[in-house]
Image (tube, rainbow, N blue to C red):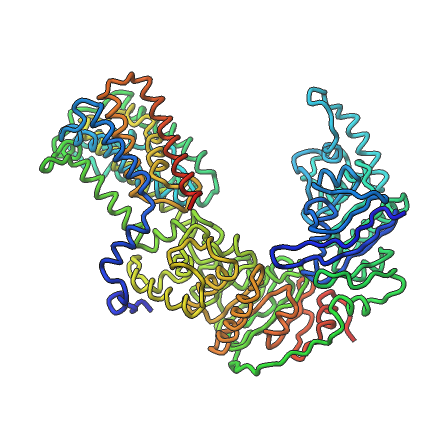
């Protein structure tokens, strides 16, 4: 019964109105404006902020958070959470480094390790009904522990060139990690807006029982989002190890907090069902820009932490106030 | 002097008057029954008397003095205790702790458990109960929990107990025990307001009965002066309702047939649904109506029995499987069972049939927009755009959109559980019309409703469900009083 082709049914959607409709449907104006304000303010007060080198630097800093934020967005949209991503970044990074060091395929190994951890999490959440907060909190320490065990606590360095390109190559003027992030965001956007699976993610987060009664395989959707999130954590782990030129068991500490902050600042509701990856990308940029700008302005690093926290709170408060008025 | 006297109590919800100038008196030591069909205003009245709602007009006198019952606490302080259908106990605490829960003590005082348990034991003994007060409530069965709640009310020296369907989950023997306790309490001077669908209980226990119909008090009399048939007549009004009947063009062979189905409280359900007919399911709350439609939709496990679709035996392990076979269910509670409130009207409508308008998991957006647009026009959906969040629509329009979900899925069998609950009159008429059109197109429709006139208006035939069994089948012209009597489990001559 799938022979209803989109071609034959394109009635009133003339291009200009389609474009206008797309803009009307976006909910990411808040974060977009926030990033713009940041750019203007730091351009004015931070020396060297508005140079091409620095902007590329910001995007490179944001790449890892951005990749992770896409996976986290999917998880949070279903009403879940994943606290283990930072540790999975480290675990997949050292696994990839160990394999790459002996001439093996580093990137695929990272992806497999990440996917395995994510799938295991998904099984526990979806089929054993364990609260995702608890599962991934346990995952956080277990994955970190394995990363240390595998390496004996030491960094795994001297990696071959064909692995480190994933973090160090530059295409034109754009670093490869940034391109990887943009591709991931584009795929995430397509998944959420155009596919059956994306629709089901929103439905499960919006009302799981109603979704089940509408024929949505709720558990399958939950399993899949954690699996995808693990896959992307594996990808981020490989990119990070490649950029640093080493698999470091200590790396990725507290990444989950940055990533969750990026998703929330981007307007995705922690209770699920509302939000999207464009917002999360902007949220990641917002946080990356803030860190960079504060650094360049010479703000005390301890004070930076406080500023970051306050700004995140303010962004979310403004966002929710705006939502209420609607 | 009456313990409680209310005069001209009126309560509106929006434009609807759910209680219209109700008068009622309750004497000390009296068991007073309130009866009425679903929607007659019983629960609103109980909420007002227990302080959960305030009346828009009217007067409440407690021992002759006008009072305001502004909150459940205020009502409790006066001595009015409501014992709910869903019990309000703390499962992790002991029986004694629950019974003495309302006791106000300085927070720094050590709790004297021995004294608590002694107090609890005394109250329980007054009820003739030998429950160990140190047990956690979660270990008790339902009638015991009911006793604990009753004991709590007594402990607080309540002088009026309100019981809402207290026997709904009890066996005959447990009911008898409860009655013995209630009689004992009354003999001590406590008054009881007793709400029940089961008329035989009212005749066994109560002194007086008040009948409500459509928010009005239609009759109050000593039970001794009435018989059951008279009570039923007062409940449904005097008219013997005969509805015009359309002749269905039903298929010769059944579309869906169920044989010997057991599921939870359901016992040996056998029924046929033909394409093109509307079948109504009549039953009291708790008779298993929702359970039946949910079982037929794969949302409740089936313990025994066979389901055939167009003669072929099918398994229904999940709603997903049922939908794939062309079965749709509009759930009882719209918010809980159907709505994805934050998502667009279009997404809500399309959710039941995404596979029909997608390939390799990618949605044909234009086709979807087109289909939903057409459907909205057909349903006369009042929404600004397809992209508005569905929560912004009125209840009636939400319901139409959700019915649209199954139209778009092309269901052959449609199960509708309370399709017009919380829906305005205009949308109600439109939903009826839609149901008739669907039937005319060959859909088999099973409607569950607490609204008897709704069923007699819509259904080509009615099945009456009582305590998990289908006890009779009726064809038009329907006699409302007899339908109600059967649903209550009374013998019909």
| Left or right: residue B368 compared with residue B281 | left
| Left or right: residue A319 compared with residue B10 | left
Q: Is residue B439 visible?
A: yes
Q: Please say if B227 is above or below A98.
A: below
Q: Where on the picture, by quarter, is residue B64?
A: top right
Q: Position of residue A310 (x, y in %)?
A: 37, 26
Q: Position of residue A318 (x, y in %)?
A: 39, 36
| Left or right: residue A83 compared with residue A297 | right
Q: Nearer the viewer, residue B471 or B198?
A: B198
Q: How many numbered callouts?
A: 0
User: Image point 41% across, 68% down: which residue?
Assistant: B377
Q: Where on the picture, by quarter, is residue A177?
A: top left
Q: Is residue A99 visible?
A: no
| Left or right: residue A94 compared with residue B384 | left
User: Image point 76% across, 60% down: which residue?
Assistant: B35
Q: Please say if B465 is above or below A60.
A: below
Q: Please say if A48 is above or below B328.
A: above
Q: Nearer the viewer, residue A112 or A8?
A: A8
Q: Nearer the viewer, residue A239 or B84?
A: B84
Question: Which image quarter is the N terminus of chain A in?
Answer: bottom left
User: Image point 29% across, 23% down: which residue?
Assistant: A250
User: Image point 80% across, 44% down: which residue?
Assistant: B66
Q: Position of residue B157 (x, y in %)?
A: 82, 37
Q: Residue furthest left?
A: A172
Q: Position of residue B159 (x, y in %)?
A: 83, 42
Q: Nearer the viewer, residue A254 or A233?
A: A254
């Amino acid at each position: 019964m799938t022979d209803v082709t989109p071609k034959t049914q394109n009635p009133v959607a003339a291009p200009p109105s389609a474009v206008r409709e797309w803009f009307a449907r976006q909910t990411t104006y808040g974060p977009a404006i926030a990033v713009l304000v940041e750019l203007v303010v730091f351009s004015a007060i931070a020396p060297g902020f508005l140079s091409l080198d620095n902007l590329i630097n910001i995007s490179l800093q944001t790449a890892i958070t951005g990749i992770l934020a896409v996976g986290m967005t999917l998880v949070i949209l279903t009403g879940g959470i994943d606290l283990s991503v930072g540790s999975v970044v480290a675990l997949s990074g050292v696994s990839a480094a160990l394999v790459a060091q002996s001439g093996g395929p580093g990137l695929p190994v990272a992806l497999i390790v990440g996917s395995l951890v994510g799938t295991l999490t998904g099984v526990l959440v979806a089929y054993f009904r364990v609260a995702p907060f608890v599962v991934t909190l346990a995952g956080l320490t277990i994955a970190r522990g394995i990363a240390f065990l595998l390496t004996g606590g030491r960094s795994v360095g001297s990696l071959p060139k064909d692995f480190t390109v994933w973090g160090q190559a530059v295409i034109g003027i754009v670093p490869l990690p940034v391109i990887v992030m943009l591709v991931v965001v584009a795929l995430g956007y397509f998944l959420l807006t155009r596919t059956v699976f994306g629709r089901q993610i929103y439905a499960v987060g919006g009302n799981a029982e109603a979704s089940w009664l509408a024929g949505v395989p709720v558990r399958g959707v939950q399993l899949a989002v954690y699996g995808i999130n693990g896959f992307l954590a594996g990808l981020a782990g490989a990119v990070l190890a490649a950029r640093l030129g080493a698999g470091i068991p200590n790396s990725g500490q507290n990444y989950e907090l940055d990533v969750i902050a990026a998703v929330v600042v981007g307007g995705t509701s922690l209770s699920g069902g509302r939000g999207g990856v464009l917002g999360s990308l902007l949220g990641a940029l917002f946080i990356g820009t803030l860190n960079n700008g504060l650094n360049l302005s010479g703000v005390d690093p301890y004070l930076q932490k406080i500023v970051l926290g306050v700004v995140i709170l303010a962004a979310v408060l403004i966002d929710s106030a705006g939502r209420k008025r609607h | 002097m009456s313990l409680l006297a209310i005069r001209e109590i009126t309560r509106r919800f929006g434009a609807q008057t759910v209680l219209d100038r109700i008068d009622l008196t309750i004497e000390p030591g009296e068991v007073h029954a309130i009866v009425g069909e679903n929607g007659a205003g019983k629960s609103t009245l109980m909420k007002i008397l227990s302080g959960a709602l305030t009346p828009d007009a009217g007067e409440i006198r407690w021992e002759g003095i006008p009072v305001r019952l502004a909150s459940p606490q205020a009502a409790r302080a006066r001595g009015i205790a409501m014992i709910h259908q869903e019990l309000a106990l703390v499962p992790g605490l002991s029986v004694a702790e629950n019974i003495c829960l309302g006791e106000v003590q300085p927070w720094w005082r050590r709790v004297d458990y021995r004294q608590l348990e002694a107090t609890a034991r005394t109250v329980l003994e007054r009820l003739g109960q030998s429950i160990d007060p140190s047990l956690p409530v979660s270990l008790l069965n339902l009638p015991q929990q009911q006793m604990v709640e009753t004991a709590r009310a007594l402990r607080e020296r309540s002088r009026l107990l309100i019981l809402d369907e207290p026997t709904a989950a009890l066996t005959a023997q447990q009911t008898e025990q409860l009655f013995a306790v209630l009689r004992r309490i009354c003999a001590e001077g406590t008054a009881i307001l007793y709400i029940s669908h089961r008329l035989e209980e009212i005749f066994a226990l109560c002194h007086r009965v008040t009948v409500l119909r459509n928010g009005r008090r239609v009759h109050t009399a000593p039970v001794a002066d009435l018989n059951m048939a008279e009570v039923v007549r007062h409940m449904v009004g005097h008219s013997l309702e005969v509805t015009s009947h359309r002749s269905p063009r039903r298929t010769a062979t059944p579309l869906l047939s169920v044989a010997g189905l057991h599921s939870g409280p359901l016992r040996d359900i056998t029924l046929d649904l033909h394409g093109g007919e509307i079948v109504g399911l009549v039953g009291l709350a708790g008779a298993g109506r929702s359970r039946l439609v949910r079982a037929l939709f794969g949302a409740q496990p089936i313990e025994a029995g066979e389901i055939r679709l167009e003669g072929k035996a099918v398994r229904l392990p999940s709603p997903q499987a049922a939908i794939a076979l062309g079965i749709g269910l509009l759930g009882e509670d719209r918010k809980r069972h159907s709505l994805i409130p934050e998502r667009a009207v279009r997404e809500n409508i399309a959710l039941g049939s995404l596979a029909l308008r997608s390939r390799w998991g990618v949605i044909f957006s234009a086709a979807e927009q087109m289909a939903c647009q057409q459907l909205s026009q057909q349903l006369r959906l009042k929404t600004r755009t397809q992209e508005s969040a569905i929560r912004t629509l009125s209840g009636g329009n939400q319901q139409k959109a959700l019915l649209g979900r199954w139209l778009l899925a092309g269901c052959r069998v449609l199960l509708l559980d309370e399709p017009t609950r919380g829906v305005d009159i205009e949308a109600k008429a439109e939903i009826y019309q839609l149901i008739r059109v669907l039937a005319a197109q060959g859909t088999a429709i099973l409607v569950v409703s607490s609204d008897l006139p709704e069923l007699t208006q819509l259904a080509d035939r009615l099945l009456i469900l009582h305590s998990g069994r289908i006890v009779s089948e009726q064809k038009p012209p329907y006699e409302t009083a007899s339908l109600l009597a059967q649903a209550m489990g009374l013998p019909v001559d």
